Image (spheres, rainbow, N blue to C red):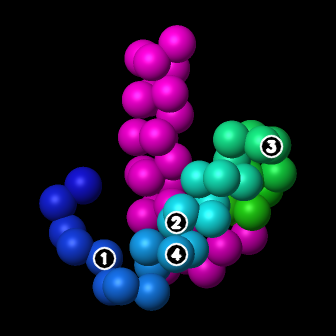
Amino acid sequence: MGKMDPPHSFMHRGWYAAMSMKSPKAAMSRAATAPSTQRLTIQGWRAAILQKWILDQ
């Protein structure tokens, strides 16, 4: 992912990860409605989390 995120994004991303684990569909719809500046970061981070989760299964 490369770039460091501003500190405020860590809390948001942690909450987002928790929500996406409970309800992937709701998380996807949330990503779709997020501001375009956040959307790419959220989707990229979610992809990494889901990939790790799948590999850990």
Three-letter residue code for mark 1:
Asp
The residue where tag 2 is placed is 13
* Real-space CA distance between mark 3 and mark 2, rounded to the nearest whole angstrom: 15 Å
User: Which percent across, then down, holds residue 15?
Assistant: 63, 65
Badge 2 element: helix
Chief SS of the magenta region: helix
Q: Nearer the viewer, residue 57 or 25?
A: 57
User: Which percent across, then down, holds residue 23?
Assistant: 80, 43
The mark found on residue 28 in the picture is: none
Three-letter residue code for mark 2:
Arg
The residue where tag 4 is placed is 11
Was residue 16 drawn as part of the magenta stretch in this picture? Answer: no
Specify start and end residues of the magenta stretch as a single range: 33-57
The residue where tag 3 is placed is 23
Q: Residue at x 51, y 48 (%)?
A: 46
Q: Is residue 11 above or below residue 29?
A: below
Residue 32, located in which quarter of the rendered image?
bottom right
The residue where tag 1 is placed is 5
Q: Residue at x 22, y 73 (%)?
A: 4
